[in-house]
């Protein structure tokens, strides 16, 4: 047994860390908006070729696995960078691998394709499984809400019901297709997001991903891979949060001693680390699980999500608490990590949806 | 034991409800809905305060001789609860709830005659300058020197977390007039007009994107000796007295109002399937857990009122219990109200939350406040004596055998 990263993975991680330290900072994260995010995407795709990481070699990729996605996502999490990576490389990469779509995988590998998932609708159910958007002779019609990253995306993945189907299908739609009206806003973590009104968007024969009605199955598999990536991101975020909090407690004095000298705060930090290491163990278990064993992998993913979300919530809330008043300002990154922790936890349905699947998987 | 309110208090609650039904007009209600922080924007809060004052209810915590209502503790609690339940704006506390009682207790007759009526009719809008960048939980370590020069003190330094200072026309301060062996002894309480030469207010933006608090810089600001409250060196006792007023509150009512928002959101049926989040066992458990916290808290609040009514003061262990559990109940309720929104809980609603905004929230109507409240609510376990400090205080009561 060996849970160390390979030599190649260490090189990859360090290269990404080096790139981010030069090209991504608090200023760009907080105020850079769409242009800064686009520039980072182009830089990382162009200079590091990272979008090819999990694309099969036969489609021009590096043929990496879930462990490679983990290495990248964890590093991105440490710096709150590149929100488009997971929907494109983890989610989209899995979709097109499942459907054997080599052409689109090549586009992902090149960095030219940036994806946003247009699945959720106005209902408040956690996993957005109820789809009212339709696809008919007049095209795609419906409203998609909370489409994270739509302002940066080259394409959106739209779920829609075809006539005569009981389950939805997935479509790959160019973001500039006529008939898409976009209303832009930000998410709390600063991610550009949008509501999309689809007013009869023309659908070409090659736009459907997989078979008619295959959407739920394709989506769940891809969302599970994306959830592994988000969990790796969460582990990276927790590492930064804990490090930052320790530094703060070691630097600030009250009542004549360093805050780090107070036992109650020492124990709090220890609890934060205990949560982090639970999360890391669950992540490793899932990354190393056999994806061919559907039931086993599902149990691993859903269980991981529950533990990671619990850990990320605890660590981010305590990091804010231990930073005192500074923790709730816009000035320190800890508040931005706190908000990103909320959106990471909520991604692909939130912990409750995963908990129910985990409970069901116990038989 | 008897938890029922007496007839006079029952009638009082009805009177407050009738008043709120009548006076809480649409524009004030709309303004209040955009309050995600500790108090309403002054454009709303001051208008409401003036209405309250016109009715003789401008100062619920003040005795009648100073223009207050003379209400007992139970009446004040009933009033606070009903205001929250009805969706009234939270009136800014610094003048009414904090400085007012201090002036009454420690001020000269000139100071009482000058300041109290001006607080009451909203002419003076107050900010609190206590914390400094290096003095938060350890407030007594504050450094800002005030040096006597003729009939003035000359004050230089900086105060932080000075909420609403960008709207305030007066600031009350703790300053250091003497370097003493016991650092609590050299602290003095004084007040200054916010537009005095040398005062600069610098915004601190919160993680919800709002501008509620500030850092205030003092560069050789001259404060006349007549603006000192109490004696030199008496500031710490005054601050302790004042903080007792900061730590009381109707936590349960505010928490309940967010559980009510969560309930309403969760009961909206899905337009496609008709399913409701309300029927989801995971959501229900989170909701029930928060409800239980709020229920326990509301009974703790009743006990505090009962203790106050029988003449005990709020500075005992119950005040710390109230603060720790109250803020925890609030945070749990705010979090559930975010969960009730599904993905919409992740939207930044700051456009819709701007005072006077006509922009609808992203998502259902009930999406307007929860997320910003949740973000701002994280501060409640930090300010007013952090929950860690409150637990230290509680331990001292336990160690001394005063509780349980």
Image (cartoon, rainbow, N blue to C red):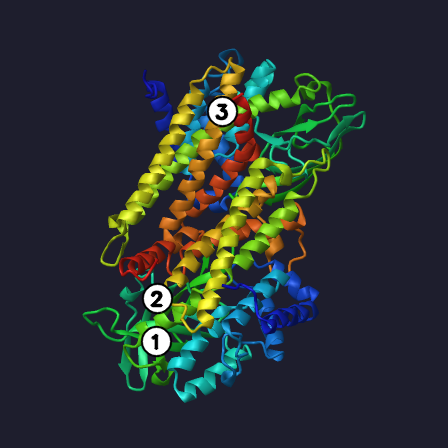
**x, y percentage for residue B152?**
32, 83
Q: Nearer the viewer, mark 1 or mark 3?
A: 3
Chain under disc 1: B
Which numbered circle lies on residue A301? Answer: 3
Residue toward you, B174 or B116: B116
Q: Are marks 3 and 2 in contact (CB under 8 Å)?
A: no
Q: Secondary structure at mark 2?
A: strand
- What residue sits 36% from the left and 64% below the top? B131
Q: Are marks 1 and 2 in contact (CB under 8 Å)?
A: no
Question: Which of the marked residues, 1 or 2, is nearer the chain's N terminus?
Answer: 2
Pointer 3 local density, CA inside 10 Å: few below 14, some 14–19, many at least 20 = many
Q: Which residue in the rendered view is the most extreme toward the top? A: A58
| Numbered marks: total | 3
What is the C-alpha distance between the residues marked 1 and 3? 58 Å
**x, y percentage for residue B183?**
23, 68
Chain under disc 2: B
Pointer 1 local density, CA inside 10 Å: few below 14, some 14–19, many at least 20 = many
Provide the residue designation for mark 1: B189
Whether residue A277 can be seen here: yes
């Amino acid at each position: 047994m060996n849970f160390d990263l390979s030599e190649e993975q260490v090189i990859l991680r360090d290269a990404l860390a080096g790139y981010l330290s030069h090209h991504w900072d608090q200023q760009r994260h907080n105020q850079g908006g769409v242009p800064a995010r686009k520039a980072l995407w182009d830089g990382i795709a162009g200079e590091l070729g990272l979008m090819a990481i999990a694309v099969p070699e036969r489609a021009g990729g590096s043929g990496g696995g879930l462990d490679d996605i983990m290495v990248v996502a964890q590093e991105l999490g440490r710096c709150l960078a590149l929100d488009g990576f997971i929907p494109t490389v983890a989610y989209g990469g899995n979709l097109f691998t499942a459907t054997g779509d080599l052409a689109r995988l090549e586009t992902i590998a090149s960095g030219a394709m940036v994806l946003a998932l247009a699945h959720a609708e106005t209902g408040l159910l956690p996993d957005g499984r109820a789809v009212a958007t339709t696809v008919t002779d007049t095209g795609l019609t419906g409203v998609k809400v909370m489409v994270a990253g739509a302002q940066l995306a080259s394409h959106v993945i739209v779920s829609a019901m075809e006539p005569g189907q009981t389950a939805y299908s997935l479509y790959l739609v160019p973001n500039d297709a006529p008939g898409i009206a976009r209303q832009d806003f930000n998410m709390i973590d600063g991610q550009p997001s949008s509501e999309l009104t689809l007013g009869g968007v023309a659908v070409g024969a090659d736009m459907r991903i997989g078979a008619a009605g295959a959407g739920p199955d394709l989506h769940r598999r891809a969302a599970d891979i994306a959830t592994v990536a988000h969990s790796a991101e969460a582990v990276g975020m927790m590492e930064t949060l804990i490090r930052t909090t320790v530094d703060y407690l070691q630097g600030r004095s009250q009542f004549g001693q360093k805050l780090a000298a107070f036992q109650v705060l020492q124990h709090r930090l220890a609890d934060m680390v205990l949560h982090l290491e639970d999360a890391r163990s669950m992540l490793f278990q899932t990354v190393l699980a056999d994806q061919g064993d559907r039931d086993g992998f599902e149990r691993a993913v859903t269980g991981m999500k529950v533990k990671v979300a619990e850990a990320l919530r605890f660590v981010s809330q305590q990091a804010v608490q231990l930073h005192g008043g500074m923790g709730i300002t816009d000035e320190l990154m800890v508040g931005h990590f706190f908000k990103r922790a909320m959106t990471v936890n909520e991604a692909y349905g939130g912990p409750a949806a995963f908990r129910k699947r985990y409970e069901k998987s116990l038989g | 034991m008897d938890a029922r309110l007496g007839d006079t208090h029952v009638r009082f609650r009805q009177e407050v409800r009738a008043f709120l039904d009548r006076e809480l007009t649409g524009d004030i209600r709309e303004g209040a809905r955009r309050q995600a922080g500790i108090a309403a924007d002054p454009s709303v809060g001051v208008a409401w305060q003036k209405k309250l004052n016109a009715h003789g209810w401008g100062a619920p915590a003040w005795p009648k001789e100073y223009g207050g209502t003379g209400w007992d503790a139970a009446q004040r609690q009933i009033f606070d609860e009903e205001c929250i339940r009805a969706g009234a704006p939270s009136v800014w506390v610094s003048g009414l709830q904090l400085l007012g009682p201090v002036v009454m207790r420690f001020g000269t007759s000139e100071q009482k005659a000058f300041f109290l009526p001006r607080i009451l009719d909203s002419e003076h809008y107050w900010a609190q300058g206590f914390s400094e960048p290096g003095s938060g939980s350890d407030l007594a370590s504050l450094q800002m020197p005030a040096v006597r020069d003729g009939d003035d003190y000359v004050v230089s330094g900086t105060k932080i977390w000075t909420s609403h200072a960008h709207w305030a026309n007066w600031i009350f301060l703790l300053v250091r007039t003497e370097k003493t062996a016991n650092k609590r002894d050299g602290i003095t309480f004084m007040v200054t007009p916010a537009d005095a030469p040398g005062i600069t207010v610098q915004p601190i933006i919160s993680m919800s994107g709002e501008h509620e608090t500030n850092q205030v810089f003092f560069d050789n600001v001259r404060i006349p000796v007549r603006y000192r409250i109490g004696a030199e060196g008496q500031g710490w006792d005054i601050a302790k007295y004042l903080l007792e007023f900061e730590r009381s509150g109707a936590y349960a009512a505010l928490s309940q109002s967010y559980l009510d928002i969560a309930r309403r959101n969760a009961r909206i049926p899905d337009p496609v399937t008709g399913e409701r989040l309300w029927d989801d066992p995971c959501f229900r458990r989170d909701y029930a857990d928060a409800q239980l916290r709020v229920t326990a808290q509301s009974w703790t609040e009743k006990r505090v009122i009962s203790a106050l009514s029988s003449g005990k003061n709020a500075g005992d262990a119950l005040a710390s219990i109230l603060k720790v559990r109250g803020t925890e109940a609030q945070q749990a309720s705010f979090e559930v109200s975010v969960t009730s929104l599904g993905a919409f809980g992740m939207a930044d609603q700051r456009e819709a939350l701007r005072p006077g905004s006509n922009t609808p929230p992203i998502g259902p109507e009930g999406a307007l406040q929860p997320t910003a409240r949740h973000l701002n609510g994280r501060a409640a376990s930090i300010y007013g004596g952090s929950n860690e400090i409150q637990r230290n205080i509680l331990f001292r009561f336990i160690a001394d055998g005063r509780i349980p």
